[in-house]
Amino acid sequence: MKKKIGDTVFCIDESVYSEHIHKREKYIISNLKDEQFRIKNNNGKLVWLPVRCFSDQLPPAIVEITIDDEIRNENNDCIEVTVKFDNNERYWLTFMTIEYLSKLLSDHQEYLPGRDLIFVNSLNREIIEKTVQELDIKNELMKEGKKY
């Protein structure tokens, strides 16, 4: 991303910098060096932050989180969740409890590839929504999910 002083960028990854920046907020570059931008943070202070936290494009916002399957057992289940964004893209994720994984391994398999799986201790709407939001804040949601 080739940028210059005065250009506008959008936060795409606030992860460990949440006290300074928020996802989808707009920031103006006041200085740059190496792989860092200097921006005025949410508290009005100038800070240096990694370029990887920003993009030219406003990232899409989550508009809907749908639990596609009935949760039969909060501590022992595997379900799919669909996330819809304001640009009409949809992604799905598979949530699996640790107990479900353990039983699956002991009953049927010696191994299980972990791609596209989100492991949680228990399943309920609150945990699912919190997990989806945290993945989004870290810019990992679209990487972890599968696009429809």
Image: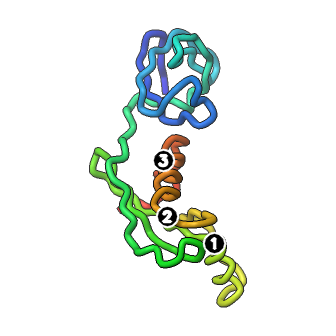
Disc 3 vs disc 1: which is toward the camera? 3
Which amino acid, by three-letter code, is at mark 3? Gln
Q: SS of the residue at dot 1?
A: loop
Residue pointed to by mark 1: 113
Seen from the viewer's position, the closer of residues 48 and 74 is: 74
Left or right: 109, with 144 as reference point = right
Left or right: 21, with 87 as reference point = right
Residue pointed to by mark 2: 124
- Please say if 115 is above or below 132: below
Seen from the viewer's position, the closer of residues 64 and 8 is: 64
Residue pointed to by mark 3: 133
Q: Position of residue 104 (x, y in %)?
A: 64, 83
Seen from the viewer's position, the closer of residues 97 and 75 is: 75
Looking at the image, do the residues carrying marks 3 and 2 touch, with CB atoms under 8 Å apart? no
Which amino acid, by three-letter code, is at mark 1? Pro
Looking at the image, do the residues carrying marks 2 and 1 touch, with CB atoms under 8 Å apart? no
Which amino acid, by three-letter code, is at mark 2? Asn
